Image (spheres, coloured by chain):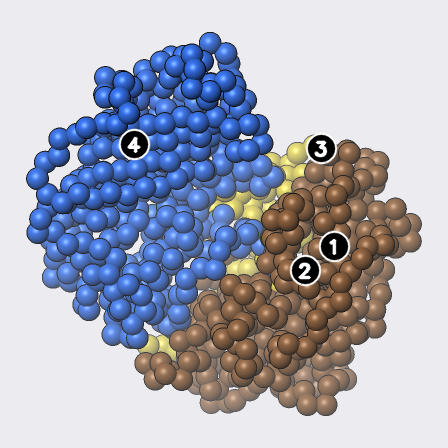
Amino acid sequence: MEERVTLSHGSGGRKMMELLEEVVFPLIGGGSPWNAEDAAILDLPPGRLAITTDSFVVQPPFFPGGDIGKLAVCGTVNDLAMRGARPLFLTMGLILEEGLPIETLRRALRSASEWARKAGVGIVAGDTKVVGRGQADGLYVNATGVGIVKESLEVGISLARPGDLLVINGYVGDHEVAVLSCRDGLDLRVKVESDCAPLASLVEAMLSAGDVHAMRDPTRGGLAAVLSEMATASRVSLELWEDRIPVREEVRAVCEVLGLDPLLMANEGKVVAAVRYDHAERVLEAMRAHPLGRDASVIGRVGEGRPGEVVLVTPLGSRRLLRMPSGEQFPRIC
Amino acid sequence: MRYVDDFRDPEVARRLVRAVLDLGKKMTVMEVCGTHTMAISRSGLRSLLAPAVDLLSGPGCPVCVTSEMDIARAIALAELPDVILATFGDMMKVPGPQGTLMDAQSRGARVKVVYSPLEAVKLARENPGDKVVFLGVGFETTAPTVAASLLVAREEGLGNFYVLSLHKTVPPALRALVEQDDFRVEGFILPGHVSAIIGTRPYRFLAEEFRIPCVIAGFEPADVLRAIHLLMTMERPEVEVEYSRAVKPEGNPKAKEIMEAVFQPCGAEWRGLGFIEDSGLRLRDEFERHDASLWEVEVPDAPGERGCRCGDVLCGRIRPTDCPLFGRTCTPESPVGPCMVSSEGTCASYYLYEGLWHDPGSRER
Amino acid sequence: MCLAVPAEVVELREGGTALVRVGGLQQEISLLLLDGVEVGDYVLVHAGFAIEKVDQQEAERTRELLEELAGLEGESEIR
């Protein structure tokens, strides 16, 4: 087979079957229904269906601690987990740019397959399209995830309640710094790996330890964006304690040098949750007993301020507003 | 992080706040450095020290003081077909009459964010068929880095490396500021990193001619607090150095020499302050062939007044919250004036960090 | 107006550059604006250039002054 993807790999003919049979099927969907039929038919356990979709366009596609395949699986699984769902199935749509090395595709799919297995989800349907050189940037992945939520469970961004404590499962900013460290032009030699991880089993442990009202994974826009959303959706005021937020020294150093804010940095393996205050101890304990929650801590609470407001309490004891970030952060010299 | 964390003990800072308040004095203090603006806003010092210390932010953000015409010119250059415009990230969201550099990029302009001007030189090396224009903004801290990069490019014979110099210098702007009739500031916190280059002498006129106490300060909350304490206890006006770990009286002679070899003073237009003699830096004639300010490009007219009061904010005449546009039509998502653009801009840092305190509804909490 | 971060010089390199360390981050920076830099020095880095050395004695003195000012006048008030 060729070393690179060509337009004929997307033509629907023999070339395409070759790509699917030699590269795609052996890695994902092997033995599952998607290689023969137009749609997968699945048996579901009892409960309500949770469904989510997300597209992944990360540049570069491979970075310390992760890659676009792992990211697609984890990102989708995590979105399901944030509603309290147990993730079951994924679909995966691939958009390939003409000229993409087949080996790059293999690596990404191998990783997706490995992480789907680890997260306990099956990749049950998929699609592949090829676009001309310059019409996409290497490899894009769209993933849809399906999961099941117990009848009685209600977890959502709008359900944080007065008195709740805010917990997080570890250090913030690792993912964004890991990706930044392999960008062209920025000479950042730093040993930070992306925190990219499937959070479903951690969330399951949290849910069985106590009442978790609201959860979100602080991806793009970081803690600042997610907490703004939570405060607005739940009509509560959130209070965040700056000196309790776990930030690695390496991440802090990158932020100092480039003038970035760790609270705005993306994560791919973090969950921030509003937990009933008298259950927080137990939930925290359950988190710390899980490999993805060892550095879990309480970082704030639902306060008494005005609904929609996120207030940051600084180490000096002053209080300031934390606003929804306005967009991409650029490295600054000022 | 050594020399960062050493000065960041919150307990020390909390006690310094107390020490300042215990003086039982009142003072209006202005800092003229965006990094100070940011440090003060992020740590919430302004609210902790009110009303004893009225902390104003002057024209210390190079993005904010860049005139609209200059921004328009930069964008016009970026839109030339054979140009790659390299810029510090700070300039990406600054609105000119044709939108921002980000907008220009979406229309097809090639704009590249760099962390160091040497990366722009590298771009020129790697793209010999294109012209790489580095957008030079910043004060005396930054101008030497651009000068040194230009010398590297010239040495290598990179004829496709250009600089659009919008650099400005601090002392002439301070003079223009204090010469204003209604100037009421009683003490200056002077920029630490500009001073690391230029030393203490260029500020002496503030103390000697205008009798205003000055302290050159570092950037941790404790540094700023000690600077305020020094200002409040100074017996007669002087230029003191709180940031002595980085600032020598003579500055950095080598950096100054390189800056002066490449740049010469010129008149410059400051947003808010207007035209100030000898407050800008332009490339010396011998660097003509690298000077992108000499290119003839069509620059659209700036729309002029839109009710934005950034000028008054920069001069300390009003607070951002006094501007009728603040937080209404002017926000970091769609800034009207430059002070809302850079996160170290006075308005943006008020908006981002101090909304709580200045918002009458929540002031009491 | 200008971010500059204290970095430890780890290694001097050819062509007037140095490898420096800030926390867990390493970067190659230019020494074109600063003479007499040695391994072990701390320098302030702005836009990829060392712009000045951190004077270690002055840093220590400032720290002592800060603590003195904090301790002398604040002790009785803070618990």
Q: Earlier in the sequence, mark 2 or mark 1?
A: 1
Chain shaded brown: B
Residues tagged by mark 1 and mark 3 found on one chain of the structure = yes
Q: Which chain is yellow?
A: C
Q: Residues within 10 Å of mark 1 (few under 14, many from 20)?
A: some
Horizontal side of C21 relative to A111 (left or right) equals right
For the residues labelled 2 and 1, the Cα–Cα distance comes to 8 Å
Tell me the residue that label 1 is attached to. B76
Asked whether residue A241 is in view, the answer is no
Point out which mark residue A91 bears: 4
- Tell me where residue B184 appears, x and y as whole percent: 64, 88
In the image, what residue occupies the spot 88% across and 46% down? B289
Q: Residue A51: x percent and y percent?
A: 24, 43
Which label lies toward us, 4 or 3?
Answer: 4
Q: What is the CA distance from the residue labelled 4 to the residue labelled 3?
A: 41 Å
N-terminal of the two: label 1 or label 3? 1
Q: In 3D space, how far apart are the residues under numbered discs 4 and 2 (Cα atoms)?
A: 43 Å
Q: Which residue is mark 3?
A: B126
Q: Position of residue B238 (x, y in %)?
A: 68, 79
